[in-house]
Image (tube, rainbow, N blue to C red):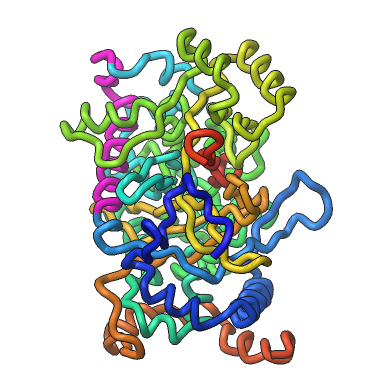
Amino acid sequence: MADRPASAFDEMHANGVIRPPYAEMARFLEATGQDALDQKRREAEVLFRRIGVTFAVYTEGGDPERLIPFDVIPRILSREEWERLSKGLEQRVRALNAFLADVYGPQEIIKAGRIPAELVRENEGFLPQMVGFTPPGGVYTVISGIDLVRTGPDEFYVLEDNCRTPSGVSYMLENREAMLRLFPDVFTRHRIAPVSHYPEELLETLKSLAPPGCDGGPKVVVLTPGPYNSAYYEHSFLADEMGVELVEGADLFVRDRVVYMRTTAGPQRVDVIYRRIDDEYLDPEAFRPDSALGVPGLMAAYRAGNVALANAPGAGIADDKAVYPYVPEMVRFYLNEEPILSNVPTFMCERESDRDYVLANLDKLVVKLARGSGGYGMLVGPHATEEQRADFAARIRARPGDYIAQPTLALSTVPTLCDSGIAPRHVDLRPFVLFGRTIRIVPGGLTRVALREGSLVVNSSQGGGTKDTWVLDDAPPAQGQSQSAAGMRQTMGGMSQGMGGMTQIMGDMSQSLGMPAPDPTPAAPANDTPRGDR
């Protein structure tokens, strides 16, 4: 492999030696060769295009539908690595949920002086409509996407918490299905924890929050803003995988503080709504009166206890970048535990001392909008021009409360198929945490990769791609040894359902294809999708 930055932790190599999780993969890559891998990459592109795995960008003109680049070399984690991460993820989501219950209730953390009152009460993510109300089951963060970065063998950092409407899980699932089709022999050499059961886990989690007394079991729907939303593919994919209705605001109505869905057989009561719409558009009677996307009266039905919403309105206060530095203190305050996962050190530009430091060190820091996403409104200091740094300095002085800054991190790299061959590229990881009566975490998550050499931005809207993420259940079997029948059925579970028409697509392919730290070091990547579907 070429181009490996000396400053970044290489997840495949350690001091020139292949790390154990990658041992079998290294042998496979050595034996396969560039031409065969390139062929698989082209097959993957045709596959994703035909089944419609796209996202949308509406700011650049032309056709907004984009195919997210998919890298055919998986990112691999050991079971031991994953166990530590999953414990840290569960701890963090419990603390975030406890914080939300507190700030919309007694506000004990504010009274104790652990977090500034104005940071919460004056934050645009804080919804007065939620004060004094407890969601079904006391759960605000039903679905969370926690962005992680790695800097060493045992060093993982939480880059960002996504507690509103985190996106990307459909790509995690489709990536695995594609890999199973493209590289079946490789799966016989590894015991890989399955992810195909995520839709079942999601549905069970949503059902667990339903109001009592649902006739015939809870009725669950996915509420989408419609086909022009950047994550519409995911909305329709998840509704299909769960076997529930995909609805828009006009498909629902509220009568006597009960939510109904319009059907050809007449109104049908709805018990749980997995909403993929921003808070302010949910209900024109409670929020923006000009919203045509939401459902009039929805918040009244919600507060009456007649419907569950996932995630809870107002959950965004917990993933605000200005609140992020206080999450370790939330763990200590609510759980009486030390955080398992660390934060990236963060400077708050609204503080005079922090602001002075940031302005004096713009060439070493990453500056972000406190409420920005998608990699926009961000300055990567070590790679910026003097003019760009001067522009950001002026912005910070004008509106210091809008900005935070973090030190640059030497993000880990993983082997990635590039035009020049296999080369290391920087990655992050978004695992998805489900919180109902219990917490469920599917092993792995969405790995996003900066495909351009030297790039630090993993966002799909800015040229990033995705990878399948493998968590090894145990040591890989001997070469050629298959998984047990039960294990393979579990790994392959849901394939025919998740990839409708895949067999025909793959059968047609032969015809269609013709058979350095610390200066400069990579900066922490920014979040991917625009707020409202992150």
Q: Please name the residue shown 71% across and 28% down the image.
A: 385
Say whether residue 200 is visible: no
142 left or right, relative to 125: left
Q: Residue furthest left?
A: 336
Write the start and end of the magenta stretch as one range. 84-113
Residue 196 vs 345, above or below: the answer is below
Q: Please name the residue shown 34% across and 67% down the image.
A: 21
Judge by depth and name the residue closer to the eye, 65 or 452: 452
Residue 405 % position (x, y): 51, 25
Residue 168 vs 45, above or below: the answer is above
Quarter of the image with the N terminus in it: bottom right
- Quadrant in the rendering for residue 399: top right
Judge by depth and name the residue closer to the eye, 94 or 28: 28
292 left or right, relative to 185: right
Q: Please name the residue shown 50% across and 46% down the image.
A: 254
Q: Residue furthest front?
A: 16
Judge by depth and name the residue closer to the eye, 320 or 426: 426
Residue 316 vs 31, above or below: the answer is above
Tell me which secondary structure the magenta stretch mostly adopts.
helix
Q: Residue furthest right?
A: 62
Judge by depth and name the residue closer to the eye, 83 or 264: 83
Residue 63 % position (x, y): 80, 57
Say whether residue 440 is visible: yes
Q: Please name the residue shown 49% across and 41% down the image.
A: 298
Whether 100 is among the magenta residues is yes
